[in-house]
Image (spheres, rainbow, N blue to C red):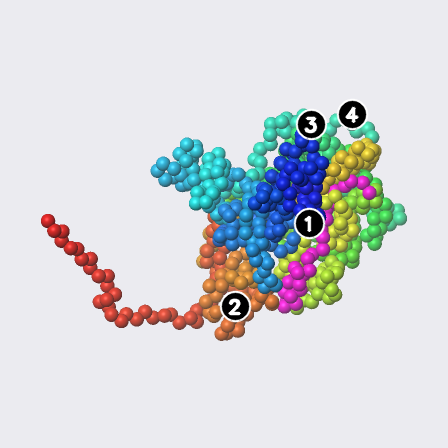
């Protein structure tokens, strides 16, 4: 809502206001004739958005009905919920009251039922403000003179009619990308035009391409972006080294995964004479190459983040930068921004410095090899003898930093992460746990302390900045977690209204080594608020840290790139004039909000791809048995998680040995006759009963569960009468 709209609304909300015609309002507000049309436009817009209404005499008044605006989330069964910004509870929308809104649409609703403690509010969509998407991916089906597309997204809710002239080269069964040309009205279907034929559903790569198109992800960089990236060259400009701290003779190295190509962080470490540690975290100087307002910058802002899928990466920056001139590859000169920190044996950062630097990475180390070195691998220790001692010094400091975080109450969400392995055609061959070793913890600790240090530095300067924030969890979510954790033997002490992360951290720590540890960690993670970006330094609950930002990954995250740009502007260029400060202050929250939104989108597609590939993997294992633990209890069944994190649903109707009811307080399923209970963390043996790559679902059944229900016998009273009577025909009279 703009200033003019707010002014008119505030005028009409005044207690002395009486309904007026437009001309009367213009007179009272002293609006001149040449600006009268502007008033009419504002009034029309407010009326269209149902903020105001006109009576029979064309006099305007505030709309008294409870009108709200939010995002509609449609269920595949037809009903949905509307999320109102700033509100925790969502508003239920029945299928009949959805007004043909699509999933993700921005809608205006009116409340038709206020609900109560046992029932959510119910609303009715009265206007679709903005459709979430204008393209859909689905399967094309031909029918003589026309066709239609069945969307992959079941929440879309309707097929799309395709006229013969809009079919393009689509053939029956093809996966296609469709542009919606007409949205459904009344009894009419949505209409569309085939933009692109993606291929047959069973062809290699079509499944991934379909999801990428469904989410509207870019497949290539625009030509102007590619050309700009090429212009940056392959080597640093030697003439630009002056003024930078030259670290090329220092022992600096990277530690990453074996398949990583965008190396954006490197480490140096030494012990000082006073017993303190001198840690250097060296981050690729991406802001030097990606200038504000450039084509590269516009594209990076639009993408927000790199997206990591099972068999590919959709990068934020072109490979020419991300894998080339910006990447801290070994044995080549690279520009960096270095954060040096002096850290005591107690884990306190007592001094720091942030500088422009030039480095030459000594080694490109992998997590796997460093883990082996720390475990005592003699061959690798000999091969990397020139840096071997540093790895043990790093381990020593990382353990100190870890303890410091634990002491202040940081929560260690020790959850299992899976990796889907695929062959050259994209078919999943295995699902394995990602191995986290000591080297992973080392790098994580060093990146965390660098992020904290940079955030603290700029909070003290009180300059426009972007922070990574994590707010306190909602009390109602904590109550649910408290109930579940209590059933598992873990009690939260203190008030939930003013909970400290340290109290929750104690529960996670206490459960380590127990069967329910993963469940506790996962459930606690689910009840946490989503971390996001903000221009205000609101602290990080999970880390129990007052100051936090993202500084260490500018190749793959736009907020980190923005942090680097601010460092360059404020610290290196010394630009602190009012115009500069006003500029960054005016754009910062928009950048933060957009980055947060794009991050959530990236997480959604990464999860959806994993779900699809896991379901595809389990299609080849139907009928096989596994052991897992109950990970979630619902009113329609329970989810069981296998050791490799694959999760399947045991439906209530498949619990055939008894009639089970859902205990929503203790989150248990209880047999009405036998009293048998299923609760979180229970070990169960299951059989894979069904799996669908298309639906991204996996169904399990309990092994050995025999039905106690008696089969109903059909009794035939009169066999002759059960037969279908013969058709009698009357002769026609001639």
Residue that numbered label 1 is attached to:
531
Q: Earlier in the sequence, mark 3 or mark 4?
A: 3
Mark earlier in primary sequence (1, 4): 4
- Residue underneath mark 3: 232
What residue lies at 61% left-to-right and 39% top-to-bottom? 45
The quarter of the picture where the N terminus appears is: top right
Q: CB under 8 Å between callouts 2 and 4?
A: no
Q: Nearer the viewer, mark 2 or mark 4?
A: 2
**Residue projecting furthest to the left:** 734
Which residue corresponds to the image point at 40% horizontal and 34% vertical from the top-left? 164
In the rendered structure, are the residues bearing label 1 and label 4 in contact, judged by CB atoms less than 8 Å apart? no
Q: Earlier in the sequence, mark 3 or mark 2?
A: 3
The residue tagged 4 is: 239
Precedes in sequence: disc 1 or disc 3? 3
Q: Nearer the viewer, mark 1 or mark 3?
A: 1
Q: Depth check: 423 or 140 in front?
A: 140
Eyeballing the image, is 86 above or below 325? Answer: below
The magenta stretch is: 462-488
Q: Residue at x 49, y 74 (%)?
A: 673
Query: How far is disc 3 from disc 2 in space, using C-alphas?
Result: 65 Å
Relative height, residue 40 to residue 538 (above, below)? above
Give the CA distance from mark 2 to mark 1: 36 Å
Q: Earlier in the sequence, mark 2 or mark 4?
A: 4
- Residue 546 screen position, x and y as percent: 78, 51
Q: Position of residue 362 (x, y in %)?
A: 74, 38
Residue on which the image places disc 2: 661
Dot 2 or dot 1, earlier in sequence: 1
Q: Residues within 10 Å of mark 2 (few under 14, many from 20)?
A: some
Q: Is residue 600 left or right of residue 465?
A: left
Membership of 471 in magenta stretch: yes
């Amino acid at each position: 809502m703009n200033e003019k709209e707010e002014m008119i609304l505030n005028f009409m909300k005044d207690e002395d206001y009486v309904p007026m015609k437009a001309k009367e309002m213009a007179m009272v507000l002293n609006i001149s004739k040449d600006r009268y049309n502007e008033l009419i436009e504002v009034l029309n817009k407010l009326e269209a958005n149902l903020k105001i209404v006109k009576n029979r005499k064309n006099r305007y008044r505030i709309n008294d009905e409870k009108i709200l605006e939010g995002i509609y989330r449609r269920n595949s069964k037809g009903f949905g919920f509307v999320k109102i910004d700033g509100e925790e509870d969502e508003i239920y929308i029945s299928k009949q009251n959805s007004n043909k809104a699509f999933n993700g649409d921005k809608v205006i609703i009116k409340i038709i039922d206020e609900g109560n403690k046992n029932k959510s509010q119910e609303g009715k969509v009265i206007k679709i403000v903005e459709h979430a998407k204008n393209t859909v991916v689905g399967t094309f089906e031909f029918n003589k003179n026309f066709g239609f597309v069945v969307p992959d997204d079941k929440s879309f809710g309707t097929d799309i009619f395709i006229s013969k002239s809009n079919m393009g080269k689509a053939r029956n069964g093809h996966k296609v990308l469709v542009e919606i040309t007409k949205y459904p009205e009344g009894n009419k279907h949505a209409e569309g035009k085939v933009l692109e034929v993606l291929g047959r559903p069973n062809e290699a790569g079509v499944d991934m391409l379909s999801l990428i198109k469904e989410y509207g992800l870019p497949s290539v960089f625009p030509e102007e972006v590619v050309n700009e990236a090429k212009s940056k060259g392959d080597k640093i400009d030697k003439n630009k080294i002056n003024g930078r701290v030259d670290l090329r003779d220092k022992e600096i190295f990277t530690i990453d995964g074996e398949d990583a190509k965008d190396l954006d962080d490197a480490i140096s470490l030494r012990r000082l004479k006073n017993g303190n540690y001198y840690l250097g975290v060296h981050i690729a100087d991406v802001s030097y190459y990606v200038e504000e307002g450039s084509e590269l910058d516009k594209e990076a802002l639009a993408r927000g983040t790199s997206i990591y899928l099972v068999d590919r990466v959709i990068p934020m920056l072109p490979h020419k930068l991300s894998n080339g001139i910006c990447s801290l590859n070994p044995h080549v000169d690279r520009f960096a921004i270095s954060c040096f920190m002096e850290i005591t044996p107690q884990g306190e950062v007592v001094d720091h410095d942030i500088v422009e630097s030039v480095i030459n990475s000594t080694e490109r180390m992998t997590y796997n090899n460093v883990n082996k070195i720390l475990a005592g691998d003699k061959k690798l220790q000999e091969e990397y003898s020139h840096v071997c001692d540093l790895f043990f010094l790093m381990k020593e400091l990382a353990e100190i930093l870890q303890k410091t975080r634990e002491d202040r109450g940081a929560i260690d969400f020790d959850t299992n992460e899976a990796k889907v392995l695929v062959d050259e055609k994209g078919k999943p061959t295995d699902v394995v746990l990602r191995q986290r070793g000591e080297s992973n913890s080392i790098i994580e600790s060093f990146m965390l302390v660098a992020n904290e240090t940079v955030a603290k530095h700029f909070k003290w300067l009180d300059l426009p900045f972007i922070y990574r924030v994590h707010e306190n969890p909602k009390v109602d979510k904590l109550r649910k977690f408290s109930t579940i954790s209590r059933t598992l033997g873990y009690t939260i002490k203190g008030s939930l209204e003013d909970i400290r992360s340290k109290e929750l951290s104690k529960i996670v720590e206490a459960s380590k080594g127990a069967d329910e540890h993963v469940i506790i960690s996962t459930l606690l993670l689910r009840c946490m608020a989503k971390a996001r970006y903000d221009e205000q330094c609101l602290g990080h609950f999970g880390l129990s840290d007052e100051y936090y930002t993202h500084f260490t990954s500018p190749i793959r995250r736009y907020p980190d790139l923005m942090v680097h740009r601010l460092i360059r502007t404020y610290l290196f260029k010394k630009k602190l004039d009012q115009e500069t400060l006003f500029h960054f202050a005016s754009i910062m929250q928009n950048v933060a909000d957009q980055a947060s939104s794009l991050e959530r989108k990236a997480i959604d597609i990464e999860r959806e791809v994993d779900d699809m590939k896991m379901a595809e993997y389990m299609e080849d294992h139907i009928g096989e048995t596994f052991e897992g633990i109950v990970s979630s209890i619902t009113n329609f069944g329970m989810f069981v998680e296998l050791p490799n994190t694959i999760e399947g649903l045991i439906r209530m109707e498949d619990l055939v040995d008894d009639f089970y009811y859902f205990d929503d307080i203790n989150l248990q399923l209880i047999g009405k006759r036998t009293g048998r209970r299923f609760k979180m963390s229970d070990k169960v043996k299951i059989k894979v009963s069904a799996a669908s790559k298309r639906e991204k679902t996996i169904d399990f059944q309990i092994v050995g569960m025999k039905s106690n229900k008696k089969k109903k016998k059909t009794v035939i009273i009169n066999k002759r009468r059960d037969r279908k009577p013969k058709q009698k025909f009357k002769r026609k009279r001639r």
